[in-house]
Amino acid sequence: MSDRTAGMTVPAARTRERTLSVTTLAAGEFHAPSLTDFFPPALLFEGTPFELDRLMLVRLIMTAVLVAVMLLAFRSPRIIPRGLQNVAEIGLVFVKEQIAEEVLGKETGRKFFPLIATIFFTVLFLNFSGIIPGLNISSNARIGMPLVLAAIAYVAFNYVGIRKYGFLTYMRSSIVVPNVPPALHVLLIPIEFVSTFILRPFTLTVRLMANMLAGHIMLVLFFSATWFFLFDATAWMKVFSPFSLLAGLGFTLFEMLVIFLQAYVFALLTAVYIGLAEHADSH
């Protein structure tokens, strides 16, 4: 093969590569999953502040689906709900009673219910795209959206504490542990400050992102292994394809549980942090 021919085939091979997903693999070839799956090339408005890649489009699609579901569910609400309204109300009642009011009490829980419900359903719907054929990835697997949601929770609980106690009193109540020897404050104050004001948003962000990133990679591995065993492996290795397929289907069911749990944990911790800020004086 000439150098010219080789120079033409390498770019051609690269153009055939597409972002690896759960059900769509590149042109009959096996490509191992990597972090580049989470930073695909731009699809629209490349080089502008409004540049959109595949993950951003998935995020916009699932946001539109969430808004459409809620509008359709409550466009003409009935006293006795049925259909989509019934499903939406079950979800809202769950967030209201099992998260907001359970953690914050009825009065405070009612006040912060819109915020907590928004966080819960946003995380839930954005996560759910990870198992929808054609979308195949949660946009929460990239740090942007988890970071925004964590920032919203961070602003919310600090706002509650500062509004109730004032900035200085709130800070003192949050980082100064009462009834300990004065010498220990040198150790405890930095620990409490880092724990309250740095680790809370950090752990909210990383927990959500890491779980969805890991889930996507595991699904890709199982289903791409099925593809590999069926079409690329030698004859004797094809017997492994049913096992990898079953493992992929089983992990999909497990991922559905993770999708719900991540939405629940994120909303629950947001409520917990709001409650801690509201009662910072009882540290």
Image (cartoon, helix red, strand yellow):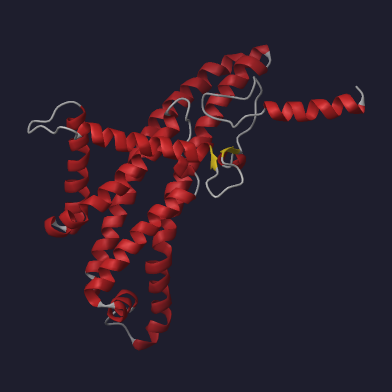
- Could you say which is closer to the camera, residue 113 or residue 215? 113
* Residue located at (80% from left, 25% from top): 9
Query: Is there any visible trace of residue 64 in the rendered image?
Result: yes
**Left or right: 246 in relation to 14:** left
User: For residue 103, what is the image quadrant?
Assistant: bottom left
Q: Is 232 above or below relative to 257? A: above
98 or 158: which is nearer to us? 158
Q: Residue furthest top?
A: 235
Left or right, 3 with respect to 271, comes to right
Residue 130 relative to residue 25: left or right: left
Residue 183 in the image: above or below residue 64: below
Q: Residue furthest left?
A: 79
Percent coordinates x, y for residue 94 in the rendering? 20, 42
Give the image location of residue 53, x and y in percent. 55, 39
Residue lying at 50% horizontally and 21% vertically, measured from the top left? 245
Residue 264 shows in the view: no
Measured from the top left, where is residue 60 in percent x and y? 43, 39
Residues 79 and 123: in front is: 79
Say which residue appears at 16% left-offset and 47% top-offset. Answer: 97
- Residue closer to the observer: 173 or 107: 107
Q: How many marks?
A: 0
Say which residue appears at 28% left-offset and 52% top-offset.
268
Quarter of the image with the N terminus in it = top right
Image quadrant in which the C terminus is located: bottom left
